[in-house]
Amino acid sequence: MNDNQNYNAAEYAYKPEPRKRSFVIPIAIVIAGLFVGGALFFSRGGFGGQSAAVGVTGNTPSTTATVPPVSSNDHILGNPNAPIVIVEYSDTECPFCKTFHETMHKIINEYGTSGKVAWVYRHFPLDVLHKKARKEAEATECAFDQGGNNAFWKYIDLIFKKTPSNDGLDLSLLPKFAEDIHLDKSSFESCLLSGRHTAKIAGAFDEAIAAGASGTPTSFLFFNGQSIPVEGAQSFASVTTLIEGILAQIKPSI
């Protein structure tokens, strides 16, 4: 991984707009009763409506995952060699993703600076519900082209901060956001108009489907060669409880 892909969590702390317990039971039991949150679901005929209560797609850790391994092509916040890596598939116009984005920044502030948890962001724009999300995803990649991983995270943080969700963001603001984080506006606009990242976003969408993502946000927690799928905008307390449980289980090896 090159230097500009290593995002320093301490250097750029996320500031959203104003808005320990011991582990003594198996992780599978914790997960079964822990995860309740908001998400968008597929139905056989396409996407279903917005739901306020979902569960986990699998209650037990798996040693095999269809989620591609983390690579230098990913957008990583925190130490990529952390004992717990959370891979999130997200949509910038999803209101639940907006909430979970703030939650994940809190998680990284709590566990990322100490190297215990890393966060990988992957695109999953749900076109049927959010017509603007795919172009916004392309915009984040144009930001990455100019400024590397730091620019990617600053840019996507700004989108989540500014959008009211559900296609409420004015796409004409995307070049201004680039200026706001000190990128070259003209180069950014050329990138966005060129469609050079269209295939990349389409590939990320297909990857999410193949991984079993049934809505946004969908996350996968990786540790010790195992993975746990998590659906919905889980609360900070819920994610923290799961992380503490995993850290307690793998403590001898970290």
Image: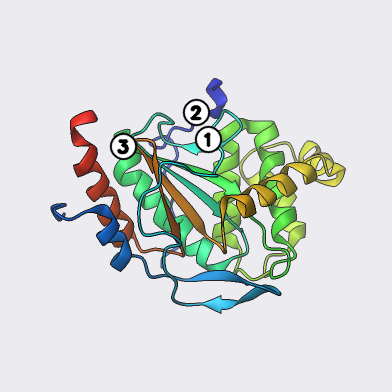
Give SS at disc 1: loop
Residue pointed to by mark 3 = 116
Residue pointed to by mark 1 = 69
- How many marks on residues? 3
In front of the other: 108 or 164: 108
> Tag 3: residue type?
Lys
Q: Is the Cβ of the residue at disc 1 closer than 8 Å to that at disc 2? A: no
Residue located 41% across and 44% down the image? 13
Above-or-below relation of 17 to 207:
below
From the top left corner, tell me how far across and down residue 68 is, in percent. Answer: 56, 39
From the top left corner, tell me how far across and down residue 111 is, in percent. Answer: 31, 42
Quadrant of the image containing the C terminus: top left
Residue located 78% across and 43% down the image? 199
Mark 3–mark 2 Cα distance, whole angstroms, equals: 15 Å
* Comes first in the chain, label 3 or label 1: 1
Quadrant of the image containing the N terminus: top right
Above-or-below relation of 138 to 18:
above
Above-or-below relation of 22 to 29:
above
Residues packed near mark 2 inside 10 Å, few (<14), some (14 to 19) or many (20 plus): some
What label does residue 180 carry, if any? none
Residue pointed to by mark 2 = 6
> Tag 1: residue type?
Pro
